Image: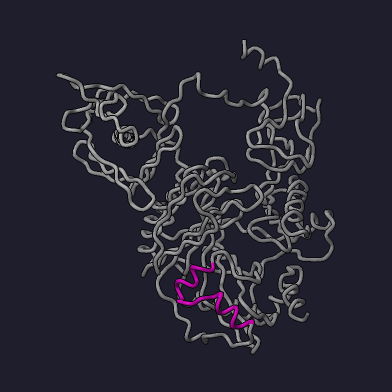
Amino acid sequence: MEKIIQVAKTSAAQHIQSIMAAAGVPVVEGYHGEDQSDQCLKEHARRIGYPVMIKAVRGGGGKGMRIVRSEQEFQEQLESARREAKKSFNDDAMLIEKFVDTPRHVEVQVFGDHHGNAVYLFERDCSVQRRHQKIIEEAPAPGIKSEVRKKLGEAAVRAAKAVNYVGAGTVEFIMDSKHNFCFMEMNTRLQVEHPVTEMITGTDLVEWQLRIAAGEKIPLSQEEITLQGHAFEARIYAEDPSNNFMPVAGPLVHLSTPRADPSTRIETGVRQGDEVSVHYDPMIAKLVVWAADRQAALTKLRYSLRQYNIVGLPTNIDFLLNLSGHPEFEAGNVHTDFIPQHHKQLLLSRKAAAKESLCQAALGLILKEKAMTDTFTLQAHDQFSPFSSSSGRRLNISYTRNMTLKDGKNNVAIAVTYNHDGSYSMQIEDKTFQVLGNLYSEGDCTYLKCSVNGVASKAKLIILENTIYLFSKEGSIEIDIPVPKYLSSVSSQETQGGPLAPMTGTIEKVFVKAGDKVKAGDSLMVMIAMKMEHTIKSPKDGTVKKVFYREGAQANRHTPLVEFEEEESDKRESE
């Protein structure tokens, strides 16, 4: 019982700040009191001064956390944070802290035992975040001098000893541009990102937990814990970065990963064919790499991300590649506003595929057709069947086939001439390419080895339904095979300009009813999906005609949520 009380005490943020200050640990100004009335919290926010951070007392993973920049938005953000915290932790108690713009989020791994010992295993930088959730972490933190590292570690140990901490814990700090730091919170568990600490210290922290729980002393003294090399962890999520990182659910139709080795770890709970459910966090895997220095580790991270290939739902893999290749990230200039600050460079608009890539896609499709024909020939035992040949052979002439592929929204016409030597001449607009290649298998994957105008390349080839996917060390491309109109289903459109459900989820709160007049940006309803709360905003000014869902109802992805009255301007546009 004493241990339970001790852990509860450490987790309760309303007590921890005073304990930390007494232990000589720098703290952030804030309110962590027992009075949880809306008015009390608002008064303390005014006293601290905006912007402030509203945080769930028992929070984690960015849930129940909101930044409030003015008093006008305080109440709405407080209610939203409370609802999300109640859903995630069954506790809607909140604390208020001063929000520091563009800080770094640096945390220290600590361990304590039953014999009064405590040690630190260096720091991790978790600054790069979206929705207040970490997506890429590294150890050690870039650009931190050894004396600052020592001060961080010693402050974390003082924090642990102040509460007689036993087991694995993480002491989190906010750090400014001059490397001044303040205590933020203590997580009384191993963090998602603990593998980067294991990689740089050569330890097994889960084993340490078990040994300490069994009453043993911490396996190593502080002097015996050494830092070697650099490690990164990238969190791979089922989400759409171009749609405000909206989580998505769906099947993992194809899943292939880099090979695991002593310097590459893949921690996951899914495999090809599994479904990413709306009922859980959308994280698919953690990719962890180690190398002798930061630049080498970053190169290894990008190499491994290119080998992590998923088909069936959107992921953040391409975003992670853009992020890890950004010059400011390479330089180690990281902070919590990194993604908003570099949003345009990280979320590049889709560029037209290179003509060479279109040739690769066309070749892959032709060779797949040929492989299917060869299989048919073996099964039919009729070598003279007209369906037993796809070589394009013609007497006295070369056969030219007109293909159409779709690059984004644009149809691309490709004239493919079947040459007698087994190669192909492909014409796109006014340019002709000489193309040849073959397919081969490696494990469960099919690869396309080809040459376009003498330039050799190798790519993983996946053709599913009406889409061709090519994954290579240069990146990935996705080319569609157009479907005739008579075969394509009618796509769902927004109802009178009303919003569609961004994902499958539960309607938590409805703010409007039929007849209400709303302005663009007004909150219409709140959805809960994948343990996150999402506010649905009005896309335009208008009058609500119909609300399709009640509170507590389940809405499927892309279904209309609200219908607006048809305005005179809408009628004129339709005419």
Q: Is residue 110 magenta?
A: no
Task: Using the image, determine if residue 7 lies above or below residue 361.
Answer: below
Name which residue lies at 68% across and 44% down.
534
Give the position of the N terminus as an image quadrant.
bottom right
Q: Is 167 on the left-hand or right-hand side of 329? A: right
Where, quadrant-wise, is the C terminus in this rendering? top right
Instruction: Give the percent coordinates (x, y) of residue 119.
Output: 56, 82
Task: Single out the residue that lies furthest toward the front.
Answer: 381
Is residue 152 among what the camera can see?
Answer: no
Residue 21, quarter of the rendered image: bottom right
Question: Which residues lie in the magenta part?
Answer: 194-213
Residue 338: x, y in percent? 51, 53
Q: What percent of the width, then of the height, locates residue 381?
A: 30, 33
Residue that appears at 75% across and 74% down: 9
Q: x, y (%) of residue 468?
A: 40, 36
Circle count: 0
Q: Which residue is drawn at 16% across and 28% down?
A: 420
Q: Does the magenta stretch include residue 207?
A: yes
In this view, 538 is above or below 273: above
Between 42 and 311, the residue placed more toward the observer is 311
Q: Which residue is drawn at 55% across and 78% down?
A: 207
Q: Is most of the magenta stretch helix, strand or loop?
A: helix
- Residue 429 vs residue 162, the one in the foreground: 429
